Amino acid sequence: MNEVPAAPAPKAADKILDVARDLFYREGIRAIGVDEIVRRAGVTKPSLYRTFPSKDELAASYLRKYDLEFWERFDEAVDAHPGNPRAQIVAFLTRVGKRTQKPDYRGCGMTNAAVEYPEHGHPARVVSENNKVELRRRLRAMAAAMGAGDSDTLGDGLLLLIEGAYISGQLFGLGGPAASVARNADLLIEASLKK
């Protein structure tokens, strides 16, 4: 009988980051202290500080991981509709709309971090800003690829819809306006392409 080797136990750094990600997303970065993270991760403070020199760096690491996952979801929608930026955007926003209807939805971790850290240059703020700048760039490029007469305005309008879905999903939850973000984006695209 062949035994499957047990998966290696997660490293302390992975445990810390997983616990921080969950707590930071649900409760907010500033609301959660290092003591709570190490307690829930079952590690010591020195373990945390060997990998993350500060809570600010831990927050930035959480957001870098969040950023990778965000772009994976975005790219899945793009890959599902090659050469069709309108369908790509609608597919991405359909998934956003569905996520906003979940009871534990807390919006976009990037947006939340930008609100929590208004000071420019803060490590968490920098990661958040870079994500939003890249999203804006991509949406504007996709609007141009659709042939929009004013692609920058359409791209920015789509970004505003997305950000609005993130916050209204938290405010209204199930049955709220965020559920229709994809339909509203498609209407905005249609209106922009008619000009």
Image (spheres, rainbow, N blue to C red):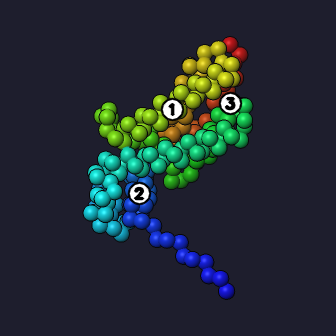
Helix, strand or loop for disc 3: helix
Residue 132, given in percent of the width and then of the height, sits at 47, 33
- Quadrant where the N terminus sits is bottom right
Residue 186: which numbered mark, if any?
Answer: none
Say what amino acid the circle numbered 3 marks.
Pro
Residue 59, given in percent of the width and then of the height, sits at 36, 48
Q: Give the CA distance from mark 3 to mark 2.
A: 34 Å
Residue 173's place in the image compared with 15, above or below, is above
Residue 39's place in the image compared with 80, above or below, is below
Helix, strand or loop for disc 1: helix
Question: Dot 1 surroundings within 10 Å: few (below 14), some, or many (20 or more)?
Answer: few
In-front residue for pair 180/75: 75
- Quadrant where the C terminus sits is top right
Residue 47's place in the image compared with 192, above or below, is below
Q: Which residue is mark 3?
A: 85
Say what amino acid the circle numbered 1 marks.
Glu
Instruction: Mark 3 or mark 1: name the one nearer the start of the chain.
Output: 3
Name the quadrant containing residue 151. Answer: top right
Q: Which residue is mark 1?
A: 134
What's the residue at 31%, 38% (across, down)?
122
Question: Dot 2 surroundings within 10 Å: few (below 14), some, or many (20 or more)?
Answer: many
Q: Give the CA distance from mark 2 to mark 1.
A: 24 Å
Residue 53, given in percent of the width and then of the height, sits at 28, 52
Say what amino acid the circle numbered 2 marks.
Leu
Q: Which residue is mark 2?
A: 17
Instruction: Mark 2 or mark 1: name the one nearer the start of the chain.
Output: 2
